[in-house]
Amino acid sequence: MCLKKSENRDVGTNHRLIFKLNVLFILFSTALIPNAVTYVAPPLEVIEAKVEQPLNVRIEALATKYGVDVSVANRIIKCESSFKENAFNKNIKDGVHWSTDFGYFQVNDFFHEKEMIKIGLDIHTPNDNLEYGFYLLQRDGTRHWKASSKCWNL
């Protein structure tokens, strides 16, 4: 089949129109569903890093890191928080809330939060809170948990 010059232009125009419509469709559909085209999965090692170790494994690792007796740490944690990572206790004196104890070791924000920030730890993050408890045990022994010693000092 032989096409005339005018028919050739129509075919070319139709292809350009279809191409432009396809481009508009792609742009419009990605605007409606932004993550459909642009989502990039994180590397596998990032996903694996977010998998948290069981508490007993973390406690044993930190006890080894800080050279602390794991049985003493476990007894203190059991008495202070019953192994609950988000345990907290508001300290009230004369009707005024003056501090809060947080986490496994019940670290007191009034006495320890500024130091934790200085060494790059967050009192509200369970793993940081746990690590700071081991840091205190290594540095100061059990003196920070003297008030609960009847419970853990068997």
Image (cartoon, grey):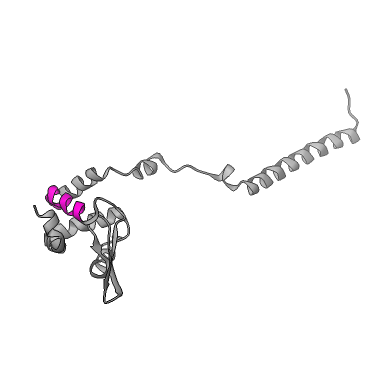
User: Is residue 85 in view?
Assistant: yes
Q: Is residue 151 above or below residue 8?
A: below
Front-most of residues 27 and 126: 126
Residue 8 in percent (x, y) is at 86, 33
Q: Is residue 34 left or right of residue 134?
A: right
Residue 69 inside the magenta-drawn segment: yes
Q: Is residue 152 left or right of residue 112?
A: left
> Could you tell me which residue is drawn at 24 percent across and 60 percent down?
106
Front-most of residues 42 and 113: 113
Q: Is residue 47 above or below residue 152?
A: above
Quadrant location of the N terminus?
A: top right
Q: Is residue 62 above or below residue 121?
A: above
User: Is residue 138 in view?
Assistant: no
Furthest residue toward bottom: 94
Residue 76 in percent (x, y) is at 17, 54
Residue 142 inside the magenta-drawn segment: no
Front-most of residues 85 and 46: 85
> Could you tell me which residue is drawn at 86 percent across and 36 percent down?
10
> Could you tell me which residue is drawn at 83 percent across and 34 percent down?
11
- Report the magenta stretch's main SS: helix
Q: Which residues are magenta?
A: 66-79
Residue 2 in percent (x, y) is at 89, 25
Q: Quadrant location of residue 142?
A: bottom left
Front-most of residues 73 and 82: 82
